[in-house]
Amino acid sequence: MGWLGAGLLIASGYGWGLRVSSRAASAVPLPAMLLLTLGASVLGLGLVIRAFLAGQDGPLVTGTVGALGAAALAVFTTGE
């Protein structure tokens, strides 16, 4: 379950990076996107922390660093 949490963290980081970097009006309003990414982040973080407490440290490191990297990738590679 920890790797599922890492995937959720990375996906929410990428989604938030896309939303922050878009200049055009989005089909998804900002409050809805914030709630969606916050919910996915909290669920993912809960899963990776649970896996960490069970003795697996890979999902926690991969998920947190991957979320930051995915957000940065989304922000700096968006096409106009």
Image: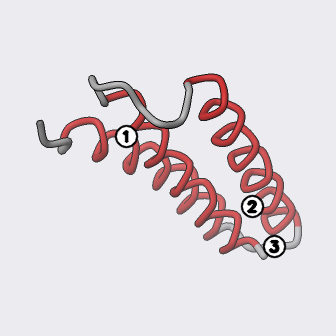
Q: Height in image: 66 above or below 56? A: above
Which numbered disc, 3 or 2, marks the residue closer to the eye?
Answer: 2
> Which of labels 3 and 1 is toward the front?
1
Numbered label attached to residue 48: 2
Q: Residue at x 80, y 62 (%)?
A: 47
For the residue marked with disc 3, what is the amino acid?
Answer: Gly
Determine the residue positioned at 36% across, 25% down. Answer: 25
- x, y (%) of residue 69? 37, 48
Q: Which residue is mark 3?
A: 55
Task: Give neighbour class at mark 3: few <14, some 14-19, many 20+ (Cα, 10 Å).
Answer: few
* C-alpha distance separating marks 3 and 2: 11 Å
Measure how far apart labels 2 and 1 are at the Cα level: 23 Å
Give the farthest residue toward the left. Answer: 80
**Disc on the earlier residue, 3 or 2:** 2
Q: Is residue 27 above or below residue 11?
A: above
Characterize the local packing of mark 2: few (<14), some (14-19) or many (20 or more) Cα atoms within 10 angstroms: many
Q: Nearer the viewer, mark 2 or mark 1?
A: 1
Say which label, 2 or 1, has the lower sequence index: 1
Q: What's the amino acid at mark 2?
A: Val
Which residue is label 1 attached to?
18
On screen, residue 78 versus residue 31, left or right, reads left
Q: Residue at horizontal 53%, vertical 35%?
A: 28
